[in-house]
Structure formats: C-alpha cells, structure tokens
Amino acid sequence: MTHAENSASLGRYRPAKPVRIIEPFGLGGGPDLLARALAPKLAELWGQPVTVENVPGAGATAGPAEVAKSPADSCTLLMNTNAHAYSAALLKDLPYDPLKDFIPIIPLTRQPYVLVAGKAAGVATVAELIAAKAKPGELRFGSTGIGTGTHIGVEKFNRAAGIRAQHVPPLPGDSNADTIAGAIAGRFTYYLVPISLALPHIRDGALVALGVSTARRSTLLPVVPTIAEAGVAGFDFPIWYGIWAPAGTPAGVIDRLSKDIARAVAGPDLRDWIAKHGAEPMSMTQPEFARFVQSESDSAARLIESSNP
C-alpha cells in the first residue's frame, strides 16, 4: 500500500510530497486563476505545498501531455476546461488519450462564454450575425484551437442558427490574447470567449458583446442578452473547469481527492471568489463526473460529425 493509499484509508489524505497542479492555458487565464485560488486551500487540508504550473503550448495539449506521463502518485494533477473532453473526439495525433490516460476527479465551476465580434466587423447583435449568413463565404469564426470549447461552442451555435462559416484556428504559438487581437483586427468575424478575458475589450469598445452562452445572463454583463434570448432558442453552452489525475491513481486516493477538493470549493471565501468571477460551483460525485466527461466527449464527436458531412 502506497503512502497516499494508506493516508486515504485512514480518512485523511496526505500526499507524500508537494503537489503540482498543471494548467495548459497560461498565466492569467481562467484555469490559472482558479487553480491559484484553490491551491492554498488544498495545502491547508493536505499539509503539503500545492503549486500551480503553467504549461501552455501545442494548442493547450502540452499541459495534459505532461500530466499523462507523470507518476500516478496523486502529486501531479491537471486543471483543465471542457476542452479536455472535446479533444478526445477531435484530436487524433495526441501523445496521450484524453479519456484513457486520465481519471476525472471532480468538476469545479461553470460559467458563460460571450459571443463577440470585432468592432470593425459591423455586427452589433446576434440577429445581425445570423442575417449575415446570406453572404456565403464571408463569415469566419475564430477559436483558441481545434477541439476547445471556443471551437465546439461556435460549431453548436452555427448549427442552431443555420450558419455556415469558415473556422480560423489560431496561428502556431498564439495565446488567448493573440486570438482576441485577431477578432479586434478583423482576422475573423466572431468568436466565443470566456467573459473574464473579453471584458476589458468590451468595456473599451474594441469588442462588441453579442450574447452570453448560458441559459441565464451573466452578472458580469447583466445588460447583454443570452444567445437564447437573442433568437437561438434553447442555446446553453457553458465553459466548465475540472481536475484530472493520471490513469493508475488508486481508486481510494481518487475518492479522497474528490471529497477534499469539494470541501475546499465549498468554503465561503472560495465560493465568494467564484461568484465574483461570474461563475458558479458544480457539484458531482467522482463517478458522476466521469460519466459527464464521457458524455461531453460523445456530444462533441456527434456535433463535429454532423457539421462536416
């Protein structure tokens, strides 16, 4: 029995060494900010340092690749978005299998994306964007990479709205900031982006907020309608964050990790932090989250298959 298994069996998880939380999007992004808010709470529970490491690159797959090859000792964890589930359906040449090489531990939060257009695009509402579909070949949408939520979400929107548009993926080495800059510069017409990243550019007028992606409006953009309110009935597509461990991590340790992380997220100061950032906690058991991740991957595969006949 390993140290982690023994501590879990005694009802208190204590890793054998400091814990690394790896996130694949870079400093200042949503996963980075949430991981840094969560890490000190876990350090208090576990009696070991918990650090956050930014491992961006390769279309947000460098971080998961690092975790996949790490020992299954519960001391290296992955913080990722829904992109981790979607990449299983879309990216075939990865150095890891997003489903088989990881164990889903727990979901953390869900929050809206916002559908934006660069000011130069001349589109001010969802209705105007949908009307532009009458000009074949002129509509282009951006994303932070094939298989990310920003890609799958727009594919879902396009299908619901009857739009056919060209996908403009990021250039090699592009960051979230580069993709936003592409929207502002008119490299593409529209883009689905996490609200926290778009907000400064919406406030200064460089980006136009067309609609938020969830069924309810965002507290960060209360005057912006939901995409459903704006004419695409039933549309609901949040960005969600979760934590994974390398495959082979003992089941008892996974259970302890799930319960401890849930306890940390339920703390009043972290819940306040989550609300301040326009998000809400997600609550699932570990088996429920594992089924959810598989379902999200399956849904993405069906969507892409139907979008590319």
Image (spheres, helix red, strand yellow):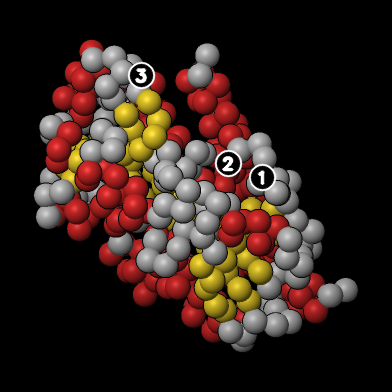
> Is 83 above or below relative to 3?
above
Mark 3 and mark 1 lie on one chain; the one further toward the N terminus is 1
Q: Residue at x 84, y 75 (%)?
A: 2
Q: Residue 81 in the image: x percent, y percent?
A: 49, 51
Mark 2 or mark 3, which is nearer the start of the sequence? 2
Left or right of 258? Residue 156 is: left
Would you say residue 248 is visible in this rendering? Answer: yes
**Residue lying furthest right:** 1
For disc 1, the marked residue is 94
Name the residue that disc number 3 marks. 164
* Residue type pointed to by label 1: Leu
Q: Nearer the viewer, mark 2 or mark 1?
A: 1
Classify mark 1: helix, strand or loop: loop
Please state, as top left, top right, bottom left or bottom right, where the N terminus lies in the image: bottom right
Q: Residues within 10 Å of mark 2 (few under 14, many from 20)?
A: many
Q: Position of residue 61 (x, y in %)?
A: 58, 52
Dot 3 surroundings within 10 Å: few (below 14), some, or many (20 or more)?
some
Given the image, on which type of amino acid does mark 3 rest?
Arg
Residue 229 picture location, percent across and down:
21, 31
Mark 2: which secondary structure? helix
User: What residue would you read off at disc 2?
Assistant: 87
Residue at 65 percent of width and 81 percent of height: 18
Q: Where residue 92 appears, x then y in whole percent? A: 66, 36
Q: Is residue 136 left or right of residue 104?
A: left
Q: Which element is circle 3 on? A: loop
- Could you tell me how far apart the alpha carbons at marks 3 and 1 are, in whole angstroms? 28 Å
Please give the name of the residue rendered at 66% of the width and 62% of the height, measured from the top-left corner: 67
Res. 19 image quadrant: bottom right
Which of the two labelled residues, at mark 2 and mark 1, occupies the earlier sequence position? 2
